[in-house]
Image (spheres, grey):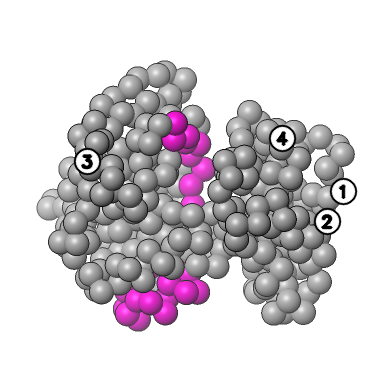
């Protein structure tokens, strides 16, 4: 069968962007990387990207040539995967919008919720927009070196436009061939809320207290976690999404346990002096709560507290 989704652009030179680029480059695809700093990188680093992987605890390092996207690549892209911080998604789409062809599948891969509302207004109404939620652990150590620290999985689903079941299967297979396990979901919005709940607990608590993910399972955080999750179930209910409080509690504890030694993305951002995604995590709960008249004091407090840690916003 011919591969009709062969031209892929990965946007973003962070850990996730490089992880997807690396794995797609090993499959039957024409993959290129759109990096915000590719002008500088191409001078010194092109064709010398170094990758280190530790799936299943086995380390093997690889040097792999890196091909940067030009506007022709964006034009001919069948799939564009945006692996960016949530606050960069809308800007990136705006910059590329006129080059994206109407048949291209646009995949938003970011933490938190909110960018879709802006993105949908920047693209033609028939454009297929999907989201991808991933639990892979990955660290970028040097400008172009990554370590795959935790083998996770990815969930994808449709946010806008129409996808035939044939396209759905092709897309899922294409991504699965690169970096399994990828599952397509009809109820992706519920999955987004579940992931959001995890991020609303783990990210601010680990960032504020400067602790590893596993430490949030300490009893001293139980009351606070329960407050955060109670507010989330109330807010999601007003958006037509039913989340069970005890399921959320268990899920958060499980993810904290599974990633116990990890430094959350928000804690890393704070420690690295970078802007955080708090506006799209607890800030999103605050905004939706306000819109639907649901009080969210704990999420609002955490949103403000993290903003105070990082006044760059
Ligand atoms: O943002 C993160 O760090 C991750 O989404 C998660 C699940 C909290 C694990 O570290």
Query: Residue 54's x, y, as percent?
Result: 43, 24
* Element type at mark 1: helix
In this rendering, the label closer to the viewer, 1 or 4: 4
Q: What's the CA distance linking mark 2 and mark 4?
A: 20 Å
Query: Magenta span covers which residues?
Result: 116-141
- Disc number placed over residue 227 in the picture, else none: 2
Q: Position of residue 80 (x, y in %)?
A: 30, 58
Residue 46 in sight from this viewpoint:
yes
> Mark 4 CB in 8 Å range of ligand 1?
no
Alpha carbon distance from label 3 to label 1: 52 Å
Residue 287 falls left or right of residue 20: right
60 horizontally vs 303: left or right: left
Do the residues under discs 2 and 1 have CB atoms within 8 angstroms?
yes
Nearer mark to the viewer, of 3 and 1: 3
**Residue occupying the point 42% across, 75% down:** 120
Would you say the beta carbon of the disc 1 residue lies within 8 angstroms of ligand 1?
no
Picture quadrant where residue 45 is located: top left
Give the residue displayed 29% in from the left and 67% down from the top.
Answer: 96
**Viewer-side label of 3, 4:** 3
């Amino acid at each position: 069968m011919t591969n009709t989704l062969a031209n892929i652009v990965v946007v973003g030179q962070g850990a996730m962007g490089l992880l997807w680029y690396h794995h797609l480059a090993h499959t039957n695809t024409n993959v290129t990387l759109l990096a915000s700093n590719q002008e500088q990188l191409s001078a010194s680093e092109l064709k010398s990207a170094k990758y280190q992987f530790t799936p299943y605890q086995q380390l093997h390092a690889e040097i792999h040539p890196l091909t940067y996207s030009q506007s022709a690549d964006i034009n001919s892209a069948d799939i564009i995967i945006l692996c960016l911080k949530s606050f960069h998604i809308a800007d990136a789409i705006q910059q590329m919008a006129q080059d994206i062809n109407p048949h291209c599948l646009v995949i938003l891969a970011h933490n938190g919720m909110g960018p879709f509302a802006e993105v949908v207004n920047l693209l033609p109404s028939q454009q297929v927009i999907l989201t991808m939620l991933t639990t892979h652990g990955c660290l970028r150590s040097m400008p172009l070196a990554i370590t795959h620290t935790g083998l996770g999985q990815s969930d994808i689903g449709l946010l806008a436009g129409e996808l035939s079941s044939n396209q759905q299967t092709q897309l899922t297979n294409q991504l699965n061939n690169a970096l399994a396990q990828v599952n397509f979901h009809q109820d992706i919005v519920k999955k987004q809320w579940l992931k959001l709940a995890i991020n609303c607990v783990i990210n601010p608590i680990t960032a504020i207290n400067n602790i590893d993910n596993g430490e949030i399972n300490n009893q001293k955080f139980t009351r606070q976690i329960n407050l955060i999750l109670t507010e989330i179930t109330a807010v999601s209910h007003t958006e037509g999404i039913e989340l069970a409080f005890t399921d959320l509690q268990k899920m958060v504890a499980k993810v904290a346990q599974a990633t116990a030694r990890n430094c959350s993305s928000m804690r890393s951002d704070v420690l690295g002096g970078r802007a955080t995604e708090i506006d799209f995590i607890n800030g999103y709960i605050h905004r939706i709560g306000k819109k639907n008249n649901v009080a969210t004091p704990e999420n609002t407090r955490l949103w403000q507290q993290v903003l105070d840690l990082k006044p760059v916003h």
